[in-house]
Image (cartoon, grey):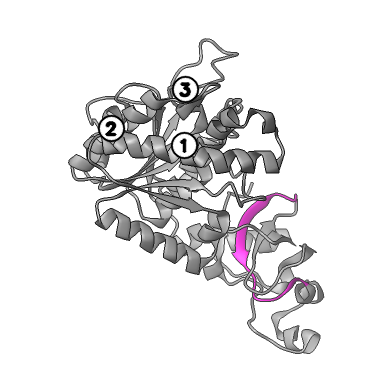
Amino acid sequence: MSQLNYKVDLLGHVRRMVVKVGSAVLSDPEGLRSDVIANLARGADEAIGAGREVIIVSSGAVAAGNVRLGKLRGSTIAARQAAAAVGQIELMREWAGAFGKNGRAIAQLLLTHQDLAERGRRKNASATLEALLGAGVTPIINENDTVAVEEIRLGDNDFLSSMVATMVQADLLVILSDVAGVLTGNPLTRPNARLIGLIADPEAEMRGLVAEGSGPLGSGGMATKLKAAREAARAGIASIIAPGREPGVLRAVLDPNRECGTLVMPAGNRLKSRKHWIAFALRPAGALGVDRGAAEALRRRGRSLLPSGIRAVKGEFAPGACVSLLDPDGVEFGRGLVNYPAADVMKLMGRRSAEIASVIGYKVADEIIHRDNFVLLRELG
């Protein structure tokens, strides 16, 4: 079945879309491509004119800055941050000029991982985006590379775009790439690689896909784009991975009568907003190894994690922290928010819930992780 069988119904419901464009699309070794930015701005303007809201997640600051600061070029964090500081000004000037030709105003938002992970900051960012869209302003979002250290390589904004799409409850995520879409292999090594036009079941059909590596201008590749599309799918958001330098690409994406790139349909097992936040926005502060019985109870019977099922504690974490859940083979199958700190979980593992107060001197709950604060990431074998 082709993507056209899905596009008519899908696009009829798209009122808000997030468009992610990376460095490999926006720039070349000589700097930013003004013609590419102008093409995308025209496409966004057409979408806005048709009654849709558009949010752009744009890379390119580091690539632009590297051209200006050739003597500082390097792979160190400081060099990348210096390049981002210089390049962000040029990047926004290009976007402002391109949208300005159509009488559109833009706004710059620089975010870090903490802005997405901490619920208060996430709420503030969401409110700002809503206010801008309500005023008819197009937000241009980039990761705040000038201050981010640990976050600076989140996946060249692919991760950021899926989190923004989830945060603003977008109807469509468009991920623009330097290739036609998701291919059956790396076109550089497999000339006969063909385009996969439709991924109707992202949970099943993404397994085993071979992705190309990142290029010299970006830190991500198709692997990060597939991951972002899968994360969006788990939130009930469709994605289209399309060729970013193709003239009129956004028009093609939104044309129900044209195939363009790879359409990734929403997952059947959509996660609620809170569980999606736990699964993808938070970073695990540690891990709990559980026995097979506990893993089966969490996976198949929707139970909470009790201390009796825990066999190992890794890392230092506080109550309320996100931790990974590992099966007996050491494979992560879920994540959850803990009710107790690591030191107390160490004392409680293998014991019954009735013993909690006598072992650690207090009791918050019978569970180490309540089922409402647990999210399954993968099936068990």
Tell whether position 334 is magenta: yes
Give me the C-alpha separation between circle 1 and circle 3.
25 Å
Residue identified by numbered label 1: 90
Amino acid type at circle 1 is: Glu
Q: Position of residue 213 (x, y in %)?
A: 61, 27
Image coordinates for residue 77, horizontal then vertical, percent = 69, 43
**Nearest to N terminus: mark 2 or mark 3:** 2
What is the spatial separation of the Cα atoms under label 2 and label 1, in whole angstroms? 21 Å
Which element carries disc 2, helix, strand or loop? helix
Residue 316 locus on image (x, y percent) = 76, 66
* Residue under pointer 3: 179
Residue at (63% x, 82% y) in the render:
365
- Which residue is pictured at 42% across the width and 56% down the height? 167
Q: Quadrant of residue 80?
A: top right
Circle 2 is placed at which residue position?
43
Amino acid type of the residue that numbered disc 3 sits on in the rendered structure: Val
